[in-house]
Amino acid sequence: MATTEFVAPRTGRIDAKYTRSKSKSGNFEMLAWLFMRISGVLLVILIFGHLFVNLLAGDGVHAIDFGFVAGKWASPLWQFWDLAMLWLAMLHGTNGVRTIIADYVEKDRPRFWLQLVLMLCSAAIVILGTLVIFTFDPCIPGSTLAVCQ
Amino acid sequence: MSKTSSGTLYRGREGMWSWVGHRVTGVVIFLFLLVHVLDTALVRVSPGAYDAVIGTYKNPLMAIGELGLVAAIMFHAFNGLRLVLVDFWKSGPKYQRQMLWGVLIVWAVVMIGFAIRHLSLAFGGL
């Protein structure tokens, strides 16, 4: 009686006839799978905190303006919080959309180009967001923030 | 492909629909995230530019949109934690269906609380 071995997808141990790409990707897909779970748990904490402070606490959504952002980013804690959120969320989302493209776009060339466009857009957003957090100056004329005195 | 779904534990059942929901909410959140980084980047252009764009968000239609966005985030978050349990907890696959109902109950409770607070802030002043 033949025994059937059930192999988890993307382990690199899949029969060659089921893989679309000829090249060996090593254990990249396993690391991507692991990253989705670890970043997902961290993002639950980071985004729940972000939503609570920005939408629910104090005056809620009414309070959001330049002064609100300046007040938060005057603190290294919120700079780090938002930087971590930016990187983890963008990598998590980009990998998710990469997986969706891989699932539905079966032809090699369209899949390659769609994923390339995705990577370029994501890289641009991550670089832009990182530069904004690190080069932001909360001090405008008349600011009452402690760091601006 | 099989004509009936009676022989599968997955297709057409809770597991499949939670997967569909996770994909759809994931894409929605990702598209929002791209726009959200761009609008926040306006703080680097000028305080006036940022306040002008954020000002256009402060209306009842956007408040409903924010409710929908938070609903998508909350489902993706709780169902994501369920996926982690399915993958890493020994009894996770056995209880995946019960955990989905748990996800939906927690989601509903959180969303009722959020909707009351957010909509009363957005519609009723403070």
Image (cartoon, coloured by chain):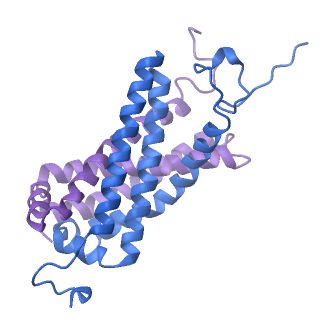
Chain colours: A blue, B purple
Classify the position of the N terminus of chain B by image quarter: top right
| B96 left or right of A133 in image | right
Q: In the rendered view, tell whether residue A115 sits above or below residue B84.
A: above
How many numbered discs, if any? 0
In the rendered image, residue B57, in percent from the top left (x then y), is placed at 14, 55
Q: In the rendered view, tell whether residue A104 sits above or below residue B47.
A: above
Q: Quadrant of residue A79?
A: bottom left
Of B96 and A103, the residue lying toward us = A103
| B94 left or right of A109 in image | right
Residue farthest along the bottom direction in this orientation:
A149
Of B40 and A59, the residue lying toward us = B40
Tell me, yes or no, if residue A135 can be seen here.
yes
| B110 left or right of A144 in image | right
In the rendered image, residue B15, in percent from the top left (x then y), is placed at 55, 33
In the rendered image, residue B83, in percent from the top left (x then y), is placed at 58, 44
Query: Residue at left 41%, top 68%?
Result: A81
Q: Quadrant of residue A141?
A: bottom left
Residue farthest along the right direction in this orientation:
A1
| A34 left or right of B67 in image | right
In the rendered image, residue B112, in percent from the top left (x then y), is placed at 33, 56
Tell me, yes or no, if residue B113 can be seen here.
no
Query: Residue at left 48%, top 18%?
Result: A108
Classify the position of the C terminus of chain B by image quarter: bottom left
Query: Residue at left 29%, top 75%?
Result: A72
